[in-house]
Image (cartoon, rainbow, N blue to C red):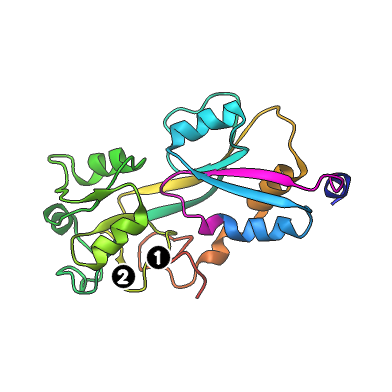
């Protein structure tokens, strides 16, 4: 609050937040709303880029903070905080031939058409754990999750999506047998760089946020889930 008051002389407090393609903006809405109470003139820009590109933008100062999933290489200059862990689920239309099952088995998944998300950071993990012998069958692809969801709603295939990802009301999410793919959602910022009041407040609020509050009715699984399939509270 003190730092925010010191910053009041400036009319605009810019904050650029980077999001990996598999990270929904729904995760940052509450933290942004919270810091807006204390940071006058808050001006937020959201940028979506692959995780490796977000690291470059952080180091270049083009992005102030970023939320990512799996990250292969993190430079020493990057601070890294784990926020929560989540599994990937199968998102499909209720009319899909697999939609009536409580859990999608691995064999059925390998026979299904998987809608391909371009530049997916979790794709290598899926290939290793779910499709070790042959790649999934891809007939359609997009770099936008919403586009893939519309294709899934029209019956074109299954989207493999992180559990927090909000989904169209015409879709349902099913767990994959054994929950083979998990990832951590992480917060990144540059070490040693002076934080603006907006950035300082955002990092503190995100790190203190109780992410378990997002869990409404978790999908049935042998492992605890932090978020439900919609990313919203019941």
Magenta residues, as a range? 7-27
Residue under the point 66% across and 29% down = 191
**Residue denoted by label 1:** 229
Which residue lies most toward the top here? Answer: 76
Q: Are marks 1 and 2 in contact (CB under 8 Å)?
A: yes
Q: Is residue 22 magenta?
A: yes
Total numbered labels: 2
**Residue denoted by label 2:** 172
Q: In which quadrant of the rendered view does residue 146 lie?
A: bottom left
When the figure is inspected, residue 189 is found, relative to residue 155, above or below; the finding is: above
| Residue 57: x %, y % from top left | 54, 31
Crowdedness of circle 1 by 10 Å Cα count: few (<14), some, many (20+)?
Answer: many
Residue under the point 33% across and 49% down = 181
Residue under the point 58% across and 27% down = 59
Residue 89 appears anywhere in the view: no
| Residue 72: x %, y % from top left | 41, 31
Disc with the residue nearer the chain's start (1 vs 2): 2
Q: Secondary structure at mark 2?
A: strand
Residue 77 appears anywhere in the view: yes
| Residue 68: x %, y % from top left | 48, 42
Left or right: where 198 falls relative to 120:
right
Q: In which quadrant of the rendered view does residue 194 lie?
A: top right
Crowdedness of circle 2 by 10 Å Cα count: few (<14), some, many (20+)?
Answer: some
Q: Secondary structure at mark 1?
A: loop
Residue under the point 80% across and 48% down = 11
| Residue 171: x %, y % from top left | 31, 70
Nearest to the observer: residue 82 or residue 35: 35
Q: CA distance from mark 1 to mark 2?
A: 8 Å
């Amino acid at each position: 609050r003190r730092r925010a008051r010191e910053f009041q002389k400036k009319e605009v407090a810019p904050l650029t937040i980077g999001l990996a393609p598999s990270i929904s903006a729904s995760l940052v809405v509450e933290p942004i709303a919270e810091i807006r109470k204390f940071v006058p003139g808050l001006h937020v820009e959201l940028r979506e880029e692959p995780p490796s590109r977000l690291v470059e933008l952080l180091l270049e100062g083009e992005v102030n903070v970023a939320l990512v999933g799996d990250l292969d290489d993190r430079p020493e200059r990057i601070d890294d905080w784990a926020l929560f862990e989540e599994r990937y689920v199968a998102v499909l239309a209720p009319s899909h031939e697999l939609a009536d099952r409580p859990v999608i088995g691995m064999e059925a998944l390998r026979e299904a058409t998987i809608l391909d998300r371009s530049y997916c950071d979790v794709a290598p993990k899926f290939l290793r754990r779910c499709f070790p012998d042959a790649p999934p069958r891809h007939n359609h692809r997009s770099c936008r999750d919403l586009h893939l969801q519309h294709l899934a709603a029209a019956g074109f295939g299954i989207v493999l999506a992180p559990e927090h990802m909000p989904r169209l009301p015409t879709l349902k999410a099913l767990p994959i047998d054994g929950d083979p793919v998990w990832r951590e959602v992480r917060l990144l910022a540059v070490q040693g760089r002076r934080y603006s009041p907006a950035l300082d407040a955002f990092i503190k609020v995100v790190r203190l946020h109780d992410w378990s509050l997002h869990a409404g009715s978790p999908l049935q699984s042998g492992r605890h889930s932090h978020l439900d399939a919609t990313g919203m509270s019941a």
